[in-house]
Image (cartoon, helix red, strand yellow):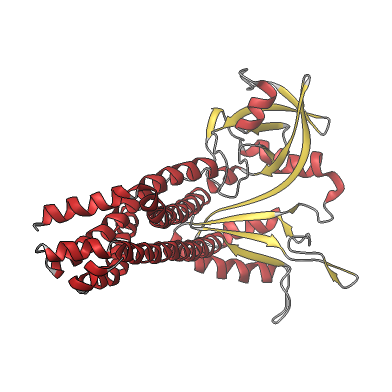
Amino acid sequence: MNFLDLIFSALQSLRANIMRTALTALGMIIGVSAVIVMIAIGSGAQAGIQSVIESIGANMIIVTPASSRNRGVQQGAGTRQSLTWSDANAIMEEIPSVKIAAPSVRTNMQVIFENNNWRSSIEGVTNGYFEARGWSINEGRLFEEDEVNRGAKIVVIGETIRKNLFQSQDPTGEIIRINRVPFEIIGTVKAKGQSTFGQDQDDILFVPLKTAQQRLLGGASRVPDGVQLIYVFAKTAQQVSLVEREVEELMRIRHEIPPGGTDDFAIRNISEFLDARSEATRVMSLLLAAVAAVSLLVGGIGIMNIMLVSVTERTREIGVRMAIGASRKDVLSQFLIEALALSLIGGIIGIIIGISLSQLTANLAGWPLRLNLSAILIAFGFSAATGVFFGYYPARKAASLDPIEALRYE
């Protein structure tokens, strides 16, 4: 028998038991599609995290207050009010590697415009904040230096605020009330959309730092000129570690912390934090891909099982083939081709389903779709190899049958 005859004969045998063929291929379909989906999800998550790093800035560190204690009980990170606007100015002036040092405070309040209202995050910032956090103006303008220093009652709003309070109306120049204080809208910032962590980044308003301290927070801060965060932007990504050390030394001097004393502040390296999260996502993706690979293994075992049953059912047929001139090699090849066809059919359908599910998952999660061609090829190749590996034993068993005994088999 030539090779084309073997393929035709193998496909006829699979077609004769179409339901069995479909159920046997199901293991391969699930395995291949699962591998593709899991790797696509992992790659998409990593791409999303990378976009966060780029939007925040790989050369960014954040200085936060440390934990406070109340009757011996730790209140948690950021509860001690120890940072001031002056600390940010000192960091900017005394550390040459620092490009921007932007202090900020944040609170949540009701925002009112005519008959519409919306509760949103209010952030008191300086001009450097917008560049440090990657915000750019859409309409209008940003703050001027003297407006920040004198505490002008002006505000720049995000896209979510504009949509909910003004719909299609141009908000520039309109007056809104925050905590019963009137503010003039001088501009809007370009939309950023949701972060990787699911937060609406556009649901925010920006006011000058001194305005927030004096008119919105009021007596909430026990530290004069107190701020909640200081965003420090190094001139280059390579200088981040140097800036981190210099900021720590400067803050310890300014806050008169003795050697060996406990810092009243904390420094977080955003790039390291997100890199760690990215690595955790990668490891989880590999774990999920390994679990998906087990599905391929189970599918292979299913192929072996069905092929062994097929050999038993077709023993007399094998005897007849051998009696009329088919060699053991022909029988071996036919059963191997059947096993390979099962795995390849399952692999092709699995690729189609895997790509479709990856697209659906990316749309639902809001991640960019990252289909890895090498992962698709590996999954398909692995499914083919699984078919050959698990199909060889049944094929060898069929080829080793004694023709006379096979003809007598009932």
Q: Position of residue 236 (x, y in %)?
A: 44, 58
Q: Is residue 230 above or below residue 266?
A: above
Residue displayed at 48% across by 64% down: 291
Q: Nearer the viewer, residue 149 or 7?
A: 7
Q: Is residue 198 above or below residue 146?
A: below
Quarter of the image that includes the C terminus: bottom left
Q: Position of residue 14 (x, y in %)?
A: 29, 52
Q: Residue furthest top?
A: 169
Residue displayed at 31% across by 52% down: 373
Q: Nearer the viewer, residue 263 or 352?
A: 352
Q: Is residue 84 left or right of residue 386?
A: right
Q: Position of residue 119 (x, y in %)?
A: 76, 35
Q: Is residue 137 left or right of residue 222?
A: left
Q: Position of residue 354 (x, y in %)?
A: 41, 48
Query: How many numbered tags mark residues here?
Result: 0
Quarter of the image that includes the N terminus: bottom left
Q: Quadrant of residue 6?
A: bottom left
Q: Nearer the viewer, residue 299 or 13?
A: 13
Residue displayed at 34% across by 67% down: 308
Q: Residue furthest right?
A: 71
Q: Is residue 224 above or below residue 287?
A: above
Q: Nearer the viewer, residue 8 or 300?
A: 8
Q: Is residue 12 left or right of residue 95?
A: left
